[in-house]
Image (cartoon, coloured by chain):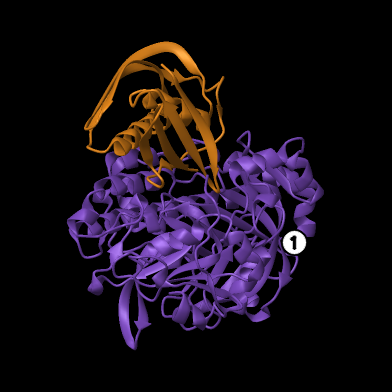
Amino acid sequence: MVYRFELFDHTADLGICLQADSLAELLPAAAAGLYAALGDMQPMNELQPWTYSLQDADAAYLLHDFVAELLALSERQQLMLVQIEQAKLIPPDLEIQGQLARIDELRSSFDREIKAVTYHRLEVRQTPTGWTATLIIDI
Amino acid sequence: MSGNYSGPLERVDAVRWRIPKSYRDGMRVDGLIYADDVLIEAIKNDQAPEQVANVACLPGIVKYSLAMPDIHWGYGFCIGGVAATDPEEGGVISPGGVGYDINCGVRLLRSNLTQQEVQPRLESLVNKLFATVPCGVGKGGVVKFRKPELLKLMEMGSRYVVERDFGWASDIEATEANGCIENARADYVSDTAIERGSDQCGTLGSGNHFLEVQVVDQIDHPAAAKAMGLELGQVTIMIHSGSRGLGYQVCDDALRQLRDTPKKYGIDLPDRQLVCAPVHSHEGQRYLGAMRAAANFAWSNRQIMTQLTRQAFADVFGQPAERLGMHLIYDVAHNIAKMESYEVEGRQKMLCVHRKGATRAYPAGHPELPDRYKNIGQPVLVPGDMGRFSYVLVGQPDAMVHTFGSCCHGAGRRMSRSAAIRAARGRSIHRELLDRGVYARARGRQGLDEEQPDAYKNVIEVVNVLHQAGISQRVARLRPIGVIKG
C-alpha cells in the first residue's frame, strides 16, 4: 500500500491532507492521520477483529464517517485500528476488515481532544497520479 | 492552504466593514464585520470573510451576516459569527452556526479575597484546583450520571445539579436563561451522545478551555462593577468550557441527519458545513430540541465545576466558600442558537439567533436580566489569553439595533496551533508565564504551547472596537495569576 498523510494548519483547528494510489488506500492514510492528530498513540498487543461497513453515494461522506467512527472508538472504548486486512471504497460501499487494539495509556501521549471531523472543505478527488482527500478536524 | 481573502470589504465607518451582497450570487444580505483598521488587516489573512459571505446565503437571514472583531476562520460559520433568521420567512437553523461545542461558554465567580491574601498560597491553590477540577483529554468527572439522570439533567439544566448540592440557588439566576433553555428534547439526543457525556459532566476538557484565577486590575465602569460585586485588587475565577463529548456528538448526529435536507427544501448552499433546515420543519425542530438539551448539559457542566472550585478554595483558605463570598457573577453561552425577540422594520419578530463564538449582550432594562443587572445591562465575559487580560463588559442599547444583542466572545486566534507550537520551540511557555506573574498547570504535552499568549489577538483591541461601536461597554479588566488547562 502506498499512501501518505500530512497535517496542516487551519487556524484554531487542524487539517489532514491524504494521498494514496487508490481510493481504498485513503482509508489507512486517514486512520494514520487521525492518530497523529490525537497525539502519539501506542497500541497494546492483544488484537480484536473489526469489521465496518456503510453506504453512501458520496466518497467524501464515506471517508468522513469512517474517520468519525475511528474517533468514536478511540474516545469511547480506547480502541485503535492497527491493521487493515481488507478495504473496499467504491461508492456507495465502504467495507473494511481489520484488527483493533486497546490504546496503551501508559505509553501513549494524548495531545489533543478532537471534537469531531467536520464537513468543511471535505473533499475526495482523483489526481493524475492517484487520489487525494482533505479533512478538517475540530479541536 | 487557505490563502488571503481578496473579496470586497467596504468601509462603513471606523469600526464596520461591509461585504456587499452583490459580491456573490446567492447572498441574500450584506456581510458586516466589526473591526478597526488594524484588526481588519489581520482578518484578511484567512478565508473568514468568505465564510461571512457564505452565511449571507442562508434562507430567511435578516439584515446582515455579522462577524465580531474576534472573527477567525472556522468551519461553516466563521468564529465570531452571528446570524438571525426569521422562521416566518423560511428562516433556517444551521448546526454549523452553533458549532460542535454547543453552549461553550464562560462564567465568572467573585471572591472576598485580595491578591495579597492569595499570592502567598497561589501555587498550592492552583495545584489544588488542578487536582480537584478534572481536566485534560478524555478525563472523566467526579460524578457519573446514569442515563435516566442525564435525561433529566438535559431537560432541567443547572437546577438539576444545584438541587444535588453542586451549587447555590443564587447561581441559577446568574446564568443566561437561568441555566436552562426551555423545550429541550433529551429524547432526541442519541445513545452515542449520552455515552460520550455520561462521565464528562463537571470536566473542563482541553484545547482552549481553562480555569483561571484572576485579579481585578482596572475598573472602567464603577457603578456596573459595584453591582457585580467587583473591586480593584479582588480575586475572581473564570471558567471556560462547554458541552464536552455529548454536545460534539449532538452536532455530529445533526449534520449527518441533515445531509440531504437542504436538497429536500430546495436550499442551495456554498459549504456542506452549513447544512440547515427550516426552523419550523420537523428536521429543524429535532435539531433545536437536541441542541437545547446539550446546552443545558453544558450549563450543568460549568455548574459542577463551579462547586468543585469553591471546594478547592475552601480547602486552601480554611473557610467555607460562602464566607469567601464566592458568588457567581454571570455565565454566558457563546456557541448557541436561541429564539429571541427583535424589532425588524418596525415589527417585533421572534428570530432564531445563531451565535458561533459570540456572546449575548443585552442592555439595561431587558426583561430577561436578573434584577441586580436590570439597571446596568447584562454582564458579558470576554476571556483574552492566559498572559494578558480578560474583560467584563455590559451590553448596550445599540446591540439590540445592530447585532441582535450580540458581542465578541474572546480575543480570537491569530496564530494556528502548529504555528504556535513552532513559535514555542526552544522556549518554556511555563517559565515565561511565571515571569509575567502567572502560575500555570496543564495536563497535555502541548497545551501551553498551543495556547500561549502570542497565539491570540490582543483582547483589548477587540473589546475597544465594540465599545466604540456602542455594542458593549467596558466594566473591568481582569489579569490572570493562576491557570489550569487540559
Q: Which chain is orange?
A: A
Q: Is residue B322 above or below residue B140?
A: below
Chain represented in purple: B
- The residue drawn where x is 46% and y is 79% is B402
The quarter holding residue A87 reads top left
Tell me if mark 1 has few (under 14), some (14-19) or many (20+) residues whose alpha carbon lies within 10 angstroms of its own. Answer: some
The C terminus of chain B sits in image quarter: top right
User: What residue is at 53 percent from the left and 58 percent from the top?
Assistant: B5
Residue B177 appears in which quarter of the rendering?
A: bottom left
What secondary structure is found at the residue carrying circle 1?
loop
Which quadrant of the structure image shows residue B441? top right
Disc 1 sits on a residue from what chain? B
**Tag 1 residue:** B114
Pick the front one: B399 or A14 = A14
Residue at left 52%, top 50%?
B305
Q: Nearer the viewer, residue B228 or B137?
A: B137
Residue at image x 27%, y 43%?
Answer: B190
Numbered disc total: 1
Q: Position of residue B384 (x, y in %)?
A: 64, 58
> Is B382 located above or below residue B398 in the figure?
above
Indicate whether B129 appears above or below B402: above
Q: Is residue B264 left or right of residue A26?
A: left
**Is residue B153 in view from this perspective?**
no
Location of residue B201 in the rendering, given as x and y in whole percent from the top left corner: 44, 45
Which amino acid is tagged 1? Thr
Residue B391 lies, in percent from the top left, at 64, 66
Residue B479 spot, x, y in % from top left:
71, 60
Q: Is residue B274 visible?
A: yes
B228 relative position to B172: left or right: right
